[in-house]
Image (cartoon, rainbow, N blue to C red):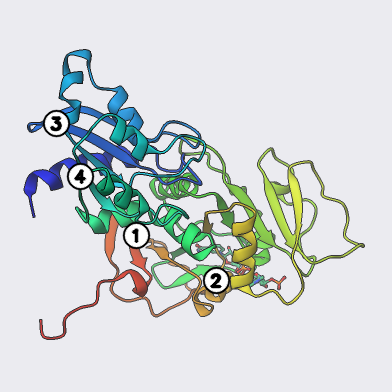
Amino acid sequence: MNMNQETYMRRALDLARLAEGDTSPNPGVGAVLVYRDRIIGEGFHAAYGQPHAEVMALRSVRPEDQDFIPDSTLFVTLEPCCVYGRTPPCTDLIIRERIKKVVISCLDKSPGVNGHGVALLRDHGVEVIEHILQEEGEYQALIRNVFVSEQRPYVILKMAFSKDGFVGRAENQVNLSNPGSWRLVHRLRHRVDAILVGTGTALIDNPQLTNRLFWGNDPIRIIPDFNKKLPSDQAFLHDKGPTWILCHKDPERDPPPSQQVIYKVIPAGTDLPGILTYLAKEGVTSILIEGGPTMILSFLESDCWDEAILSTTDRFLGSGIVGPTGWTCPQDRIRIGTDDFDWFRHPRYLRKCDPTG
Ligand SMILES: NC(=O)c1ccc[n+]([C@@H]2O[C@H](COP(=O)([O-])OP(=O)(O)OC[C@H]3O[C@@H](n4cnc5c(N)ncnc54)[C@H](OP(=O)(O)O)[C@@H]3O)[C@@H](O)[C@H]2O)c1
């Protein structure tokens, strides 16, 4: 592996992450333009509808460096697009600028792209090098690639455990995590299009489910309420944030309590994968499942998840509701104050180990 290629791709990935949570339904993408081991341009896709990373990188080149563009190498975290979306194809721009070499991390699985961007560039004599920091690039583009190739939102499970393995009490809300952890959770909320909780959590915790401790928008709050359990005084039914109540067709259901609450009618008998397909059709590309344990278990049993973020806090509850068990070998672990966060990826994303070592 060429170390310089990795270094520049790492810079492009860092740039891509600057717009985390802002680009949906597009992925965050970063680009770096390098001439003789010097970065002469860099940029990232900042928001849906805004110029793509390649455009921003080229726009950032100073007048005195413009002549170097054709002899530079363009590093992009994702395959350049070759279709018209809200902006023109980036492959046109690369060809027009006569850039001779493009290095990418992974393919864009979007319809019409998915290898065609690379093929088009090669047809025009551009040298394309693929798979540089592929694993990191694929993770960066994963929400988008899961959404377009599987027509479902990318699913993140999140749950906090007390030191003795409980997740809450049946009679009242308990706070398990420390304020530093709340901020991380709000950052997660910023990263996704929607948050989902079960009616049990809604009834016991009466949560706000907004992003108050990190910058950016509030995600849509989604509550499946097929058995009409939600009382009308729930906090999230009366603030300004968008809320979707998933329900079955029922002429006797009261009208939504406020303008930002929308009933989404789902046919009776729709299973969890079916609900996710429905949400994808409604434009939800990613969803954070914030509990409770029955809902999390439901996603686990249906095998409908991509990542799980579980924290173990320093509180002892002594008794209470037990959370889903059996989590082993986290892919990563961080500590925030007194809370340990374990990060799991679905086994489908884990590299197959060679048993011979
Ligand atoms: N520690 C944490 O991270 C955390 C997070 C959230 C909540 N909690 C705690 O968890 C407790 C509540 O837990 P819980 O298990 O009772 O509540 P829950 O998981 O929030 O809600 C359970 C309800 O969700 C619905 N549900 C589950 N699977 C479903 C599916 N596949 N499709 C549609 N609906 C589905 C069912 O509602 P219907 O019966 O109406 O069908 C079920 O009764 C509270 O004490 C709360 O404080 C802890």
**Residue 155 seen in the figure:** no
Q: Is mark 2 within 8 Å of ligand 1?
A: yes
User: Of marks 1 and 4, which one's residue comes earlier in the chain?
Assistant: 4
x and y percentages locating residue 163 in the rendered image? 38, 68
Q: Mark 2 belongs to which amino acid? A: Pro
User: According to the image, label 3 marks what residue?
Assistant: 71
- Judge depth for marks 1 and 3 and give the one in front: 3
Report crowding for label 3: few under 14, some 14 to 19, many 20 or more residues within 10 A (C-alpha).
Answer: some
Image marks 1 and 3: residues in contact by CB distance under 8 Å: no
- Image quadrant where one finds the N terminus: bottom left
Quadrant in the picture for the C terminus: bottom left
Q: Residue at x 80, y 53 (%)?
A: 232
Q: Which residue is mark 1?
A: 341
* Residue at the image position 40 percent from the left and 50 percent from the top: 181
* Nearer to us in this view, 49 or 247: 49
- Is the residue 228 above or below the residue 89 in the image? below
Point out residue 176 in the picture as x, y percentages from the top left corner: 47, 58
SS of the residue under disc 1: strand
User: Label 2: which residue?
Assistant: 293
Q: Disc 4 marks which residue?
A: 10
| Mark 2 vs 1, N-terminal side | 2
As helix, strand or loop, the secondary structure at mark 3 comes to helix
Q: Is residue 30 left or right of residue 167?
A: left
Number of residues whose C-alpha sits closer than 10 Å to that of mark 1, classed few (under 14), some (14–19) or many (20 or more): many
Looking at the rendered structure, the kind of residue marked 1 is Phe
Q: Distance of mark 2 from mark 1, alpha carbons? A: 17 Å
- Residue 280 x, y percent position in the rendering: 59, 58
